[in-house]
Amino acid sequence: MSVQTIPVASIDDSYSCFRLTSPAQISTMQQSLAASGQLHPVIVCPGGSTYRLVDGFKRFYAARALGWENIDVRTLEADHVTAKVMIMVYNSHSGSLVNYEQASIVYSLSR
């Protein structure tokens, strides 16, 4: 999984409905990106002419708010089901998913 740079505008953030982010979190990330640059790529899945964002929502929103034209990504091939599971897996180690987010993902998978 190599890192590549793609246009911010080519990223589809429709999976953001499974993550809760606050303006304060985005602001903190903006400060970090402005001071240190992007230390970790976001994770995306190809989806036609766009890329579906799977991990790195705060980094993505902060980069977009800062007016970045490009962002570093790691690209993984995954269907919708696998991508939703990946959201859970990527965030399980840090405990950053709250119960509502987990329930929302599980509910979407069961439909």
Image (cartoon, grey):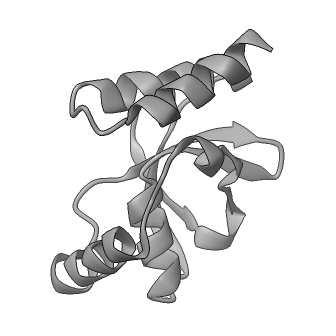
Q: Is any part of residue 42 visible from this angle? A: yes
User: Number of numbered discs present?
Assistant: 0
Where is the C terminus found, in terms of image quarters? top right
- Residue 72 left/right relative to 104: left
Q: Position of residue 25 (x, y in %)?
A: 32, 68
For the point 71% across and 50% down, the residue is: 14
Q: Nearer the viewer, residue 100 or 40?
A: 100
Q: Is residue 21 above or below residue 29?
A: above
Specify the farthest residue to the top.
Answer: 110
Q: Position of residue 1 (x, y in %)?
A: 40, 32
For the point 25% across and 76% down, the residue is: 28
Q: Is residue 47 above or below residue 107?
A: below
Q: Position of residue 17 (x, y in %)?
A: 64, 47
Q: Is any part of residue 77 visible from this angle? A: no
Q: Position of residue 51 (x, y in %)?
A: 67, 49
For the point 73% across and 10% down, the residue is: 110
- Residue 67 left/right relative to 30: right
Q: Is residue 20 above or below residue 2?
A: below
Q: Is residue 91 above or below residue 37?
A: above
Q: Which quarter of the figure has residue 47? A: top right
For the point 51% across and 89% down, the residue is: 67
Q: Nearer the viewer, residue 47 or 86?
A: 86
- Residue 109 left/right relative to 95: right
